[in-house]
Image (cartoon, rainbow, N blue to C red):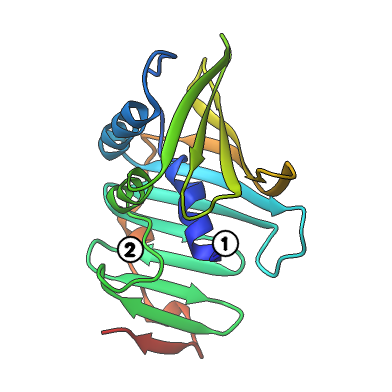
Amino acid sequence: MDKNKLFIKVLVFLLGFANLSAQESAIDIIERVRENALMLNNVYYKFNVSSEFENNLLPINGVFYIKGEKYLIDTPEIDQIYDGEKFYTIIHENKEIIISNENNSFLNFTPSQIFNFFLKGFDLKNQNINENSHFITAKSPEEKDIIYNIFINSSNLSIEKIEMIEEQSGTVINRFLTLTYDYNLKVPLSLFKFDINDYENYLTVLEN
């Protein structure tokens, strides 16, 4: 599976759940999550993504800062800055910087783009485990043997865990954990600005 699509699916559930109820449909919840995510200011996530299979990218730890539609993803392997106009994808292993616009970026994690991606073509179901936990299952007809389980803490409405599961065997292909989540922080605007001087000897590639 395309690792960038997986990363998008993981990040869609990082952007905040507000006032969930067991009676709401999963689509209603995601719609409300989108509205809530766009209202939150200066959001910070620390995350870990791991796999039970050999993977060149995973396990990976990183942080994700969001201010409106601007954001910064910082991991040891790949960083990305979106300043509201252009995407700057920094691949450290290759010492390469890819500069692109919203229409042709192969990685696009703006809140609106993430939610639009997940609301198209996925069968989403909200299930209530108990008073303390919810989980949403997500399944795409394009991935017939893959199901995503998203575990939510009902008391503080935070994402505890996301599992990508091979449905037939029950094997966990990938597992995501939110390590830290906070918002309304003081985040400097310089965090969302790209400075070529920070990347000496990196090759710059412009995508038109």
Identity of the residue drawn at 56% across and 8% down: 131
Count of residue discs: 2
In this view, the residue in front, 74 or 130, is 130
Q: Quadrant of the C terminus?
A: bottom left
The numbered dot on residue 50 is none
- Callout 1: helix, strand or loop? loop
As drawn, 155 above or below 73: above
Identity of the residue drawn at 45% across and 77% down: 198
Q: Categorize mark 1 by other alpha carbons within 10 Å: few (<14), some (14-19), many (20+).
A: some
Image quadrant in which you'd find residue 37: top left
Q: Quadrant of the N terminus?
A: bottom right
As drawn, 12 above or below 201: above
Q: What's the amino acid at mark 1?
A: Thr
Which residue is denoted by mark 2 in the rendering?
82
Which residue is denoted by mark 1 in the rendering?
75
- Horizontal side of 49 relative to 71 (left or right) equals right
Residue 83: give x, y in percent of width and height: 28, 63
In this view, the residue in front, 174 or 206, is 174
In this view, the residue in front, 130 or 155, is 130
**Sequence-wise, which precedes: disc 2 or disc 1?**
1
